[in-house]
Image: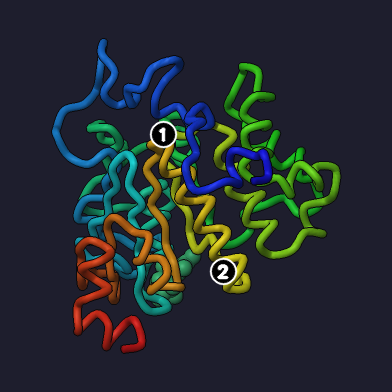
């Protein structure tokens, strides 16, 4: 036992790092009483039949749907160039969705800027350039909290509890860290806004299998606080093994959808996308 609650087992009981449960209540924010914008009983976050591409270029996504609910890890897999990152960017508002919609907690946010989506509760860790390399670890976390006007110290402590190595390296330039540690900075930065949903594009890219397992463990811990997690992964087998829901994208379309287990057991998915 390390004495660190985030290190012992997978049961992260401290939900305060996210705001899915509000303060002092176990009720997820999207089910809180009082005024609500929820208009349907659909998923908490959904990019629904999205078609679109970059600028005036051709459509990359073709009626692509990805979604996630509280307490779930939803994983998007598929070959290189399938449009996984594009689908994430579409959900985050970084490209034109020509048809289809994006809804968060029942509210249509299709026309909102990425900044406004952050204010609405989206935390996004892009695949590349996801940290400020010349800034210290702590400055990166402070930057992550840019929309907040309240005291961020508690959240920062929670990020440091989740990723103890970051506390140790808090005054070091983030660019000096290892690949796995940088990814922790990137996830930590996204958590600093206390998001209602976390989107991760290849959080384990370029790290060793051991570091990958560690990152997945931390992601599971965050998910156990109730925070919905939508992530793209190239380590398809390992990711589907921890996924409540999986999407296989091929050429911008949904090729297969199911629970992580169903996809792992599907002979066609195995043969074509999981190396047999
Ligand atoms: N910024 C961009 N501008 C134009 N086309 C892009 C851009 N980013 C990606 N694409 C194209 O979109 C397609 C899907 O890419 P991407 O979403 O990055 O795939 P994946 O993440 O599944 O590997 C590719 O054909 C790629 O060339
Ligand atoms: Mg990608």
Kindly give the residue lying farthest to the top in the view shown.
Answer: 34
**C-beta proximity under 8 Å, tags 2 and 1:** no
Q: Residues within 10 Å of mark 2 (few under 14, many from 20)?
A: some
Residue 151 found in image quarter:
top right
Residue 43 found in image quarter:
top left
Q: Secondary structure at mark 2?
A: loop
Residue that badge 2 annotates: 205
Q: Is 81 placed above or below 62 here?
A: below
Cβ of mark 1 under 8 Å from ligand 2: the answer is: no
Quarter of the image with the C terminus in it: bottom left
Q: Is 162 placed above or below 105 here?
A: below
What residue is shown at x 57% (from left), y 59% (from top)? 214
53 lies left or right of 182 = left
120 lies left or right of 206 = left
Q: Residues within 10 Å of mark 1 (few under 14, many from 20)?
A: many
Kindly give the residue lying farthest to the front in the view shown.
Answer: 1
Task: Tally the numbered discs.
Answer: 2
Spatial CA distance of label 2 from label 1 is 24 Å
Image location of residue 112, percent across then percent down: 38, 37
Marking on residue 196: 1
Image location of residue 221, percent across then percent down: 48, 45
270 lies left or right of 84 = left
Image location of residue 28, percent across then percent down: 33, 26
Residue 250 found in image quarter:
bottom left
Q: Is 26 placed above or below 190 here?
A: above
Mark 2 or mark 1: which comes first in sequence? 1
Given residues 44 and 73, the one toward you in this image is 73
Q: Secondary structure at mark 1?
A: loop
19 lies left or right of 52 = right
Image location of residue 15, percent across then percent down: 47, 30
What residue is shown at x 20% (from left), y 65% (from top)? 257
């Amino acid at each position: 036992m390390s004495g660190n609650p985030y290190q012992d087992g997978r049961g992260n009981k401290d939900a305060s790092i996210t705001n899915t449960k509000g303060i002092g209540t176990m009720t997820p924010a999207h089910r809180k009483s009082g005024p609500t914008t929820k208009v349907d009983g659909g998923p908490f976050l959904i990019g629904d039949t999205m078609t679109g591409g970059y600028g005036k270029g051709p459509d990359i996504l073709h009626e692509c749907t990805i979604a996630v609910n509280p307490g779930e890890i939803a994983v998007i897999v598929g070959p290189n160039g399938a449009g996984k990152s594009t689908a994430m960017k579409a959900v985050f508002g970084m490209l034109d969705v020509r048809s289809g919609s994006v809804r968060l907690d029942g509210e249509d946010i299709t026309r909102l800027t990425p900044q406004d989506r952050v204010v609405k509760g989206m935390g996004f860790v892009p695949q590349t350039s996801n940290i400020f390399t010349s800034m210290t670890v702590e400055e990166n976390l402070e930057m992550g909290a840019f929309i907040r006007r309240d005291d961020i110290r508690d959240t920062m402590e929670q990020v440091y509890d989740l990723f103890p190595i970051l506390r140790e390296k808090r005054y070091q330039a983030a660019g000096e860290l290892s690949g796995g540690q940088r990814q922790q900075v990137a996830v930590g930065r996204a958590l600093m806004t206390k998001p209602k949903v976390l989107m991760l594009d290849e959080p384990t890219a370029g790290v060793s299998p051991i570091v990958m397992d560690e990152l997945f463990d931390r992601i599971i811990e965050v998910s156990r606080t109730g925070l919905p997690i939508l992530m793209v992964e190239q380590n398809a087998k390992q990711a589907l093994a921890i996924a409540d829901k999986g999407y296989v994208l091929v050429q911008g379309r949904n090729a297969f959808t199911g629970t992580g287990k169903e996809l792992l057991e599907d002979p066609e998915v195995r043969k074509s996308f999981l190396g047999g």
